[in-house]
Amino acid sequence: MSEPIDDVTPPAAPLISVVKGQPTAEELAALTAVVLSLGGAETADSRKPTVRHWVRRQQLRLAPSPGPGAWKRSRG
């Protein structure tokens, strides 16, 4: 009979550590929320036309260029 294997991995290093003071659970939760919100920003797609682009095209009375997805670009 084989003995069960304990698949114990060492705990990862903490992402945030308090080095001074005794913060409450609410303060730690607020700090964690702020820190997590800073790291998850995604960049905007640079190929997507901006509002300024469309205003300029309307002022010059330029029609959308034909091709795949032209119906998406045709809205004003």
Image (spheres, grey):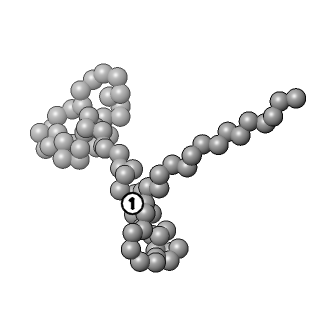
Q: In the rendered view, does 76 fall on the left or right side of 32?
A: left
The residue under the point 30% across, 39% down is: 45
Is residue 64 or residue 42 the one in the foreground?
42
The residue under the point 37% across, 52% down is: 39
Q: How many marks?
A: 1
Percent position (x, y) of residue 33?
44, 63
Q: Residue furthest top?
A: 67
Q: In the rendered view, does 65 fall on the left or right side of 20?
A: left
- Where 71 falls versus 6 (above or below)? above
Kind of residue at disc 1? Val
SS under mark 1: helix
Image quarter (top left, top right, bottom left or bottom right) of the C terminus: top left
Disc 1 marks which residue? 35
Q: In the rendered view, does 23 fall on the left or right side of 38?
A: right
The residue under the point 35% across, 27% down is: 69
Percent position (x, y) of residue 6?
71, 40
Image quarter (top left, top right, bottom left or bottom right) of the N terminus: top right
- Where 23 falls versus 61 (above or below)? below
Task: State whether residue 55 appears in this view.
Answer: no
CA neighbours of label 1 inside 10 A, class few (<14), some (14 to 19), many (20+): few
Name which quarter of the figure residue 67 lies in. Answer: top left
Is residue 2 or residue 17 the one in the foreground?
2
Q: In the rendered view, does 40 fall on the left or right side of 65?
A: right
Is residue 69 or residue 12 the one in the foreground?
12
Q: Residue furthest left?
A: 60
Percent position (x, y) of residue 15?
44, 55
- Where 7 falls versus 28 (above or below)? above
Task: State whether residue 19 appears in this view.
Answer: yes
- Where 30 falls versus 54 (above or below)? below
The residue under the point 38% across, 74% down is: 20
Percent position (x, y) of residue 64?
24, 31
Is residue 68 or residue 21 the one in the foreground?
21
